[in-house]
Amino acid sequence: MINNHIPKWDDSFSVGNDRIDHQHQYFLSLIEYLDESVDSNTSPAFVKHMLDEILLYARFHFCSEENMMEQYEYAGYNRHKKLHEQLLHEVTRKIIHFSMNKAELADIIEFLLSWFLTHTINEDKMFHESLK
C-alpha cells in the first residue's frame, strides 16, 4: 500500500443521487484496489490494466454526469466538462509516461485521490444542489 489514507466511502461523499453516488463509490474502490495491489508483487501488466480501467471508468462516469447536466440544463455544464477533460488529459499523460516506478505510481494514486475528493465534494455536490 502506497497511500495509507485512502478513505472508505461514507455519506460525506454523497451527492444525493444514487446512480452518481454508486459510480463515485466504485471509482474510489478502483483507486483503493490499485493502491493495495502495489504490495502484492503485482505484475506490471496488471498495474497497467488497472490504470487503463480507471481511465475507462472515469470516461464512462464523466459521460454519465455530463448527460445528466445537459438533461437538467445545468448552467455550469461547460466549466464542469472542461474539468473532466483536464483530468482525462492529465491521467492519460501520467499513464503514458508511467514506467512501473513506485514513486510514479504513488503520484498517480495521490493525484486521483486528491482530484476525486476535491471534485466530488466541491463540483459534483454543487451540480446536485442546483437540482433541489
Image (cartoon, rainbow, N blue to C red):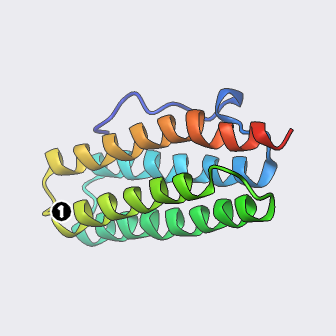
Provide residue 131's location: percent of width, then percent of height: 82, 44
Hey, which residue is sitting farthest right in the picture? 132
Instruction: Tell me if 21 is positioned left or right of 38 in this view.
Output: right
Q: Front-most of 32 and 69?
A: 69
Q: Front-most of 80 and 13?
A: 80
Q: Quadrant of residue 16?
A: top right
Above/below status of 50 relative to 120? below
Q: Amino acid at mark 1?
A: Phe
- At horizontal 74% and vertical 61% (from top left) the residue drawn is 68
Label 1: how many residues lie within 10 Å, few (<14), some (14-19) or many (20+)? some
- At horizontal 38% and vertical 70% (from top left) the residue drawn is 52
Provide residue 55's location: percent of width, then percent of height: 43, 66
What kind of element bears circle 1?
loop
Q: Quadrant of residue 91?
A: bottom left
Instruction: Tell me if 105 is positioned left or right of 14 in this view.
Output: left
Instruction: Tell me if 12 is positioned left or right of 120 in this view.
Output: right
- At horizontal 24% and vertical 55% (from top left) the residue drawn is 41
Identify the residue position indicated by label 1 in the image: 98
Provide residue 121's location: percent of width, then percent of height: 58, 33
Provide residue 6's location: percent of width, then percent of height: 44, 33
